[in-house]
Amino acid sequence: MIDAGSTGTIKASSPPDTPTYAVLDLGGASTQIVFEPVFASSDMQLEEREHKYDLRFGGRSHVLYQHSYLGYGLMRARRHVHRLVDFMSTSQGSKPKAVVGNPCLAKLHVR
């Protein structure tokens, strides 16, 4: 479905054995994921529920898993990091540090 060459474009047709790729969309409050699962045996398949999506594209049929994970978006992650930093700064004893480092962020050199 996606050309793995240098263009990285979506093709309207592709050979049946062309691999597909997962798509992740990081939103503010949620993260969406869509992919075509590969099962160990042909008698396994996705349940007929809200996370299953049938797609016909490029002359091929795809059965996709799709789900939106509420609470795992960028703004929610930032909120949790800020709460953790606040907690760490107040739990340093009687004198809280003026700056609490974050291992996920680059260190800045201040002159």
Image (tube, helix red, strand yellow):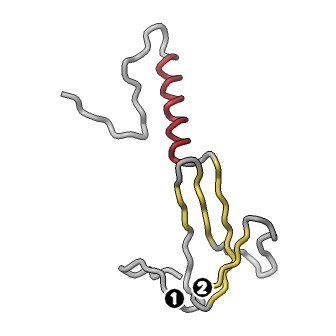
Is 80 located above or below residue 14 in the figure? above
> Which three-letter amino acid code belongs to the residue tagged 1?
Ala
Residue 19 location (% of width, % of height): 56, 80
| SS for callout 2 | strand
Give the label on residue 57, or none: 2
Residue 62: % across, % down: 66, 81
Taking the view exactly as shown, the residue that stands out farthest to the left is 111
Q: Is residue 12 left or right of residue 46?
A: left
Taking the spot 81% from the left edge, 69% from the top edge, the residue there is 47
Residue 59 vs residue 28: left or right? right
Q: Pointer 1 and pointer 2: residues touching (CB < 8 Å)?
A: yes
Measured as percent of width and height from the top left, residue 27 is found at 53, 53
| Residue at horizontal 48 percent and vertical 16 percent from the top | 92
Q: Quadrant of residue 71?
A: top right
Question: Which x, y percent locates residue 80?
Answer: 55, 35
Give the camera-side residue of 4 and 79. 79
Q: Residue furthest front?
A: 28
- Give the left or right position of residue 8, taking residue 86 as reference: left
**Left/right of residue 79 with respect to residue 109 in the rendered view:** right
Callout 2, which amino acid? Phe
Label total for image = 2
What is the C-alpha distance between the residues marked 1 and 2?
A: 7 Å
Q: Is residue 46 above or below residue 62?
A: above
